[in-house]
Amino acid sequence: MKSQLQTQQDKSCLKASKLAVFYEDIVGFDDYIEVRIMKVKEKYMFSEYAANWSELVGIMKKYSKPEFNIYFGINTRKIKGKKDKDIEYRQLFYFDIEHKGKKPALSDVYYNIQLKHTIDYIKTNMLNMYDMQSCALVISGRGYHLYYKIKPILETPENKRKFKEWYKNIQKIMEKNRPHQDIKFSDSVFNIGRIASAPGTKNTKYKEAPVRKIIFIAPEAINDNKQILDYEIKIIRPAQTSKSLKCKKYTEDTIIKSPEFLLLTEYPVPEGNRHSTLILALKLLMRNNGLTNTNEIEHALDQAGMPGEKFDINELPEDYTYSKGILINWCINNYEWCDKVGYKIPYDISDSSFGKTIKNKKGQPDKEILEWELNTYSDIREFIKDYNTNTVKVDENKFTYYTYDLLRLLDKLVTDKKLLIFLKNNKIIERIMYTKNEKPDRNNGKDSTTD
């Protein structure tokens, strides 16, 4: 009896906690919260679903182990699914505030001060410029997630585009005067199915396994959505691509020779839903080429071990566009699998893109740079773009990057050596250096675009 009473008291304390308020009152269970679990070593993700607080606590306890990292879908699902189409309304978004390069632990006092300055900067600007108040601040691991709740917005193609452009615009405005250049809060993830570090769990990505604590919570802070719904969206124009990445034309006979189709049907694609990105790329490629032999492709996928894949290209959102980068990024995210099966990225780049040449910078890089720690592809990409932008020289029609033996520098900074070898072997390093948004303004030699 005493044991039962103690259990009831424990549950009562949990119910009254910030965590319960966050998940019940801010996120809500309408009808399910998706809990996405990553098996850290295998880098494989799968999902479970909670219809109430008790089920959520059970899932978190089940996977609160060093081999798992736990995330959650910030907008609730109408069914047990993790696709955008499974979500009816958007009501939450957040700013992901962290260091651009090496991410110190939050025990680093100066780093924490920088983060808090940036949090205050965002909160002040969001309140003064957009009359929006934050509903929660959560430790994500070695950074913070600053949440905002809005009155629910029905997810239609038009509303999706409005939110995306509105959110991109406010990020762009606030980025200009951010208090610390090393601290970022802008990103390119706008989809309604976005996931985030799950409050109440540990971020096992880092050796100190920081607890994802809720710093403050304000469930009453629900902001009006009118400025989003009234936002004037821009006319979508065909994306400009470099010559090396132009889309090849396919027919109903030759589509089966496309890298996307061949990767899906001739290689043992990893189990789970990781192949869905490749299927999306193939659908977009077929739509771009005006192909209609979807039944044939659906049958081929079924024979390749992916039964039940409905290959309907008419359901694709209008603003989705095909890019070879979809397959390239998939390979980078699954580089260990690619290396295991011997798959090499099939798309080449031109070494003469934009007339750039690569040279070595004499001398040694700054000591501060040598202290950076590049843990992921995203870290590597940002480092190369920032480092080369800062050392670019413009000489008439040529853009020359004076890089201190970049590959040797990456050897020192990248922690995942297998990832670095994969990037080198597939010429991804060169691809980043030739990225179009790094092209400087010919008038002043500075980067002319903002990420």
Image (spheres, helix red, strand yellow):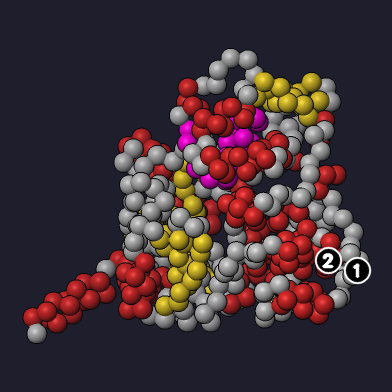
Q: Residue furthest top?
A: 363
366 sits to left or right of 269: left
How busy is the neighbourhood of tag 1: few (under 14 within 10 Å), some, or many (20 plus)?
few
Disc 2, SS:
helix
Tell me the quarter of the picture where residue 175 sits. top right
Instruction: Please state the horizontal and vertical placement of residue 403, each as a whole percent of the image.
Output: 65, 24
Tell me the quarter of the picture where residue 247 sits. bottom right
Residue annotated with mark 1? 253
Task: Judge whether residue 117 can be spotted in this image.
Answer: no
Instruction: Please state the horizontal and vertical placement of residue 374, each as a whole percent of the image.
Output: 51, 39
Q: Residue furthest front?
A: 341
336 sits to left or right of 325: left
Which quarter of the rendering shows the N terminus? bottom left
Please name the residue shown 67% across and 40% down the image. 425
Please name the residue shown 49% across and 58% down the image. 42
**Callout 1 touching callout 2 (CB < 8 Å):** yes
Instruction: Please state the horizontal and vertical placement of residue 337, each as a whole percent of the image.
Output: 60, 55
Name the chief secondary structure element in magenta. helix
Disc 1, SS:
loop
Please name the residue shown 83% across and 44% down the image. 244
Which region shows up in magenta? 372-390
Q: Nearer the viewer, residue 320 or 219?
A: 320
377 is within the stretch colored magenta: yes
173 sits to left or right of 442: left
**Which amino acid type corresponds to the residue marked 2 in the rendered image?**
Ile
Which quarter of the rendering shows the C terminus? top right
Residue annotated with mark 2? 256
Q: Is residue 177 above or below residue 301?
A: above
**Which amino acid type corresponds to the residue marked 1 in the rendered image?**
Asp
